[in-house]
Image: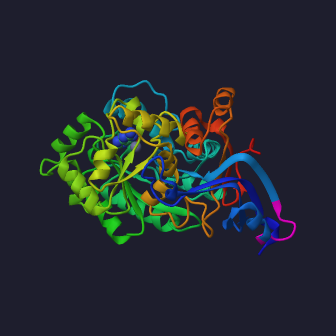
Amino acid sequence: MNTSNAKILRGRLLSFNAQPKGADDVSAYTYEEDGALLISEGRISASGDYSNVRKQAPQGCQEIDHRPHLIVPGFIDPHLHFPQVQVIASWADQLLDWLNDYTFPAEQKFADKDHGDRIAKSFYDTLLSHGTTTAAAYCSSHPNSVDAYFEEAERRNMLMLGGKTMMDRGAPPALCDTAQSSYDDSKALLEKWHGRGRAHYVITPRFAITSTPAQLEAAGSLAKSYPDCHVQTHLNENHNEIAYTLELYPDAEDYLGVYETYGLLGNKTLLGHCIHMKERELGLMAESGSVAVFCPTSNLFLGSGLFDKARLEASGVRTAVATDIGGGTSYSMLRTLDEGYKVLQLQRQRLHPLETIYWATLGNARALSLESRIGTLETGTDADVIVLNASATPEMAIRHETVKSLSEELFLLQTLGDDRAITQTYVAGQPMKASGN
Ligand code: GUN
Ligand code: ZN
């Protein structure tokens, strides 16, 4: 073992091994009151009770004491838009106006590589300060933007997923590619980036409205040739979007039927939003293993509707939870969980705090089929971990005085927490938050 970069993180460890079935489901997680991780070569080489982990550490190993804070796996954000860093907080009507008025103009700036490079630095600084160690993002339609995105991730050694947005209609000409150029560019980017370091390429047709049938066919053909790559797109977010999609694809049985026709469904397919779902679509999602990605702050901000988690899960659909920056309004997965909780409350679906923290860690890792690497503190996995402080602000600290259980602490973190509650973010064992301790 290389002792020079081995380190011990000491603190209260929390890691899930299953989706908690309720408030009392202690079998879904492991918790160590005086726990530790031994980190070596970017991986977790021991995990558990501090005294046991200490015994396995090499002589002179650095030790960082994060007590009394919680150490959990880094948050995973499985749906957001890298070129929308300057779109967040734009006063707009609903989805289609928001896209035309703010989003498409902002994305055009990514033709310039320098712009992409500058935004990438800010994007990753922000993710890391909010405790997000892995994300799946849409880049712009410019290949440059994908290079900017993965180059900066590589500098930080982050496990990131992303891809060039394919869009050949329904947007300003400066953003549109063609079916052929989107195929060629995506293929070249995929071959350049997928599997290089920690990069994962995602085949990214934006949504049915901005793709001709020829382009969706090209995307499907890429998905077939590269089954190891994810596919990401949007589905059933907004009523006007759905109506227009069915006008453009009159032969489709329903919205999901469009993606079905072009071979875009499967257990690596991430479908953002999935709010207004037909019964047939639920069955098809479940059968194909495609993932429904809940984006609560975006769904509220754009007035899109309420994600029906219970209905989706009762139908056997896999789910994930994400920020959807810049339709979403916070980079924080804690803020996202809080808003998600409220969206489900409105439908009398009361999420338990164990389940929300599971969702943002192991749940999202499973949705991305990456649970053997991230979303857990198990030995042998990547050392992407965060340190959470439930007394980070005066109002959290005073409320924390009355907290009596782990669940209550998690609920406090979710309800009042944001980037200030992230004491430190470790990526492959390296501390990435300048102010962390
Ligand atoms: N549908 C197509 N593109 C987008 C986007 O950028 N954001 C959201 N929220 N929905 C979309
Ligand atoms: Zn989106």
* Rendering coords of residue 202 (x, y %): 43, 59
Residue 233 position (above or below residue 106): below
Q: Position of residue 206 (x, y in %)?
A: 35, 48
Return the x and y of residue 258 as percentages of the image width and height.
21, 53
Residue 430 rendering spot, x and y as whole percentages: 72, 57
Q: Which residues are magenta?
A: 56-62
Single out the residue that lies furthest toward the left: 251
Task: Note whether 61 is above or below 104 in the view shown.
Answer: below
336 sits to left or right of 345: right
Q: Quadrant of the C terminus?
A: top right
* Near-viewer residue (288 or 344): 344
Q: Is residue 323 left or right of residue 226?
A: right
Against 148, is 130 above or below? above
Q: Main secondary structure of the magenta part?
A: loop
For the residue pair 102 and 309, the one nearer the viewer reads as 309
Residue at horizontal 50%, vertical 59%? 27
In the displayed structure, would residue 401 be above or below residue 286?
above
Q: Is residue 216 visible?
A: yes
For ligand 2, give the image quadrant.
top left
Residue under the image location 45 percent in, 55 percent down: 19
**Residue 408 falls in image quadrant:** top right
Please tell me which residue is depicted at 77% across the width and 62% down the height of the picture: 7
Residue 61 on the magenta segment:
yes
